Amino acid sequence: MKTSIYVLALGAFGIITTEFGIVGILPTISRQFDVSIDTAGWLLSAFAITVAVSSPFITSFTTKINRKFLLCLVMSIFVLSNLISAFSTNFTMLMVARILPAILHPLFWNIAIAIAFKEKGAKGVSTVMLGLSLATVLGIPLTTYAVDLFQSWQASFFLSSAISLIAFIGLLLFIPSIPADQAISTKNQVAVLKSPLLWLNLISTIATLAAMFASYTYITAYLEQITKMDSVQISMMLLLFGGMGTLGNWLMGLALNRNVLLTARVFLILLVTVQILAYYFGGHYIPMVILVSLWGMIHTGGFLVSNIRTTQSVPHHALEFVNSLLTSSFNIGISLGAFLGGLVSVYYGVHYVLWVSILLLTVTFIVSFVTFPKDISENEQASELKQVASPCEQY
């Protein structure tokens, strides 16, 4: 594996740590700026919504710009925004500091995933997404611990800024110049929207992510109320969940290299099975420890499965644009899942949020059998795949 792909994974680690690191310090932020906890929660929600809205547009507007320059630009903005967050004197200033990097967030992600896919296929994408898994396992706990260690809420943002700075230096040193393909126009990229298969995959992505986060968003409440675990035990379970997710991400990359559609279907079946078992054995400590391990290992693979399944037949010149649509789909799915899970939790109890996931996963599994006849446009796409040279071939 080339060093450049590991550097991109480090960049993903920094970006995801910045996005979700706020979760661990929301109560502290709420007290610091004298706002309610749900208002403080908008520091995460506004970030996700901004990413979902900006993703297709920011990618289309930057097609003519050197890709290395854009990667470094985005990471430098993350360094700066975290510093501004640390020195914020009011909640509004902190919110603005959060939204600024969110606008450019999808640009890094879309370019990094496109480069990794062109270089090493599913294995390359899996390596970059390892940064996401590690951010969940290490980045978020570290930024939360920094607040307790230094007794200062600013410490979280200083640490996030330092991580982003290291990633920026890595990009500067190890990513070669990747000139934009001047022959690629926005019109050519948008042409892929004519594919019904693309739309089917994007809808499946939204449903998959909604299913994943309808239950995962409330896993802490589930373990607390149903399994009767205390705070220390829950922390260990979340660490176990994330650690197994790292292993699962690697295994999923290997499986996807063999058969994408079969792996996608097996993923859906396994996650449904774990959710059903968690529903029936949720009140038993030892079984839930085992199930949380399996749940974490399967869960993280959802990002990779959705990405590879959607991009496998996309012409190289449209990868960044399609990845931008995927980034939007991810964030829409996450928001939708959290919303639906919240509704069910309020009206029926947290025990039943698992059935939201089960239903959505079952529908997605059925949809996976929908096929479209090959037509001229698909043949043209296959031809373009062979003709369009990857800018990464300069490595």
Image (cartoon, rainbow, N blue to C red):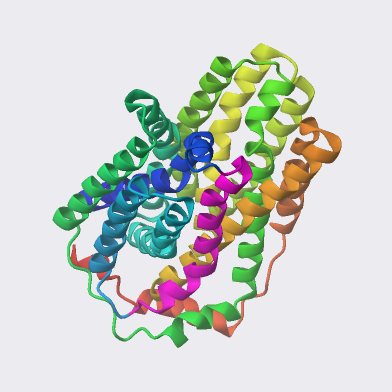
The structure residue drawn at horizontal position 45% and vertical position 72%, both measured from the top left corner, is: 321
- Residue located farthest toward the right when viewing the structure as drawn: 348
- Residue located farthest toward the left when viewing the structure as drawn: 173
- The location of residue 170, given as percent across then percent down, is 19, 50
- The location of residue 144, given as percent across then percent down, is 42, 31
Eyeballing the image, is 39 above or below 60?
above
- The location of residue 134, given as percent across then percent down, is 40, 37
Eyeballing the image, is 383 above or below 159?
below
The answer to which image quadrant residue 333 occupies is bottom right
Whether residue 135 is in magenta: the answer is no
The answer to whether residue 189 is left or right of residue 393 is right
Q: Is residue 318 visible?
A: no
The answer to which image quadrant residue 46 occupies is bottom right
Residue nearer the viewer, 315 or 31: 31
The answer to whether residue 231 is left or right of residue 253 is right
Residue nearer the viewer, 7 or 263: 7
Whether residue 43 is in magenta: the answer is yes
Pick the quarter of the image with the C terminus.
bottom left
- The location of residue 299, given as percent across then percent down, is 57, 39
> Start and end of the magenta stretch?
35-63
The answer to whether residue 337 is left or right of residue 388 is right
Residue nearer the viewer, 320 or 43: 43
Eyeballing the image, is 82 above or below 327?
above
